Image (cartoon, rainbow, N blue to C red):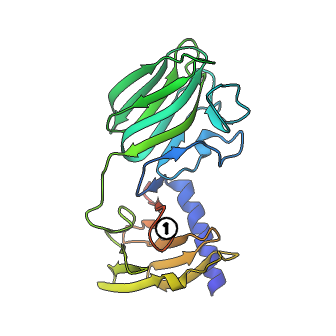
Amino acid sequence: MHSIFKRTITVGIVMIIAFSAVMTVFAAVSTGFEEFAVNTSVNSLTIPGVTFSGGPEFKVNTASPFTTFSGNYISGGGSGTLTITFDSPQSHASMKFAQAANPFQVTAMLNGSVVNTVQFTGTVGFNEGIASIDDTFDQLVLASGGFCSGCFAIDDLVTEDAGVSSVDNRLNWHYGDATIAILYPGDNAVDVYDYATGNYIFNFITANDVPDTPPDQNTIIRQEGNIMVSILTTGEIQFNLGPDAEGKSYVFIMGDIYGSNLYGFKYDPSE
């Protein structure tokens, strides 16, 4: 029976990634793109809290000729732009840039409307500099000046969340907490409110349920109704929540029992 459940977990994650955007509870972003292989398309980057979209020219690169870059970076080409979309509003963003021609333009947007457009001039190397913007935004559109709007590169993207928080100390805000279950931090544990039964379950999982060494395969440690908890091969704790009455399902992942590195996925059959 456990082997069937393990296959269900794997298939569920694949379906969710294929049909839904990756989301995160705490959505400040910091990345130098080091975890991705060279030539990975920006459209395939998996960074909790943020989605990149651009033409086929935008990929992970390395062996930089740029004086201010180190390790991996994102570079493009042609006449396209690079769009960075955040799962929750941000209040600040900064990044290194290099380009074929000045200026480097950052357009900040919120709910589909432009809130600010800032242009930056690179002064060293390949028109290199640091772009920094302070506004409330959920999307950035990047472009370079001159004849080639996509001829630029970025590195070391850092943002700050705008401070939107949940209504209480629940862990899984926006991930099934309105219809399936609410996860709360407990005493070296995670407590659960189960909508299906109306019960508040203390110590739904505890620190004793989490092995010191990650398992060789994803392993279920508890299931109650449409709430299932597994320990992943990464050592992370995964909650599978759903489906609810509308068919929506959620995967919510915690770095440890104390609620570090929270992120998740959702699957909505209507989207």
Residue located at (49% from left, 54% from top): 20
- Viewer-closest of 7 and 169: 169
Q: Residues within 10 Å of mark 1 (few under 14, many from 20)?
A: many
The percent position of residue 163, horizontal first and vertical second, equals 31, 50
Horizontal side of 166 relative to 16 (left or right) equals left
Which residue is located at x 44 percent, y 79 percent? 226
Mark 1 residue type: Met
Query: In the picture provided, is 173 more to the left or to the right than 228?
Result: left
Q: Is residue 90 above or below residue 14?
A: above
Horizontal and vertical percent for residue 154? Answer: 57, 31
Image vertical order of residue 251 relative to residue 125, above or below = below
244 or 86, which is in the foreground? 86
Residue position for label 1: 254
For the C terminus, the quadrant is: bottom left
Which quarter shows the N terminus?
bottom right
Above or below, comparing residue 60 to residue 15 in the picture: above
Whether residue 222 is visible to the viewer of this picture, yes or no, is no
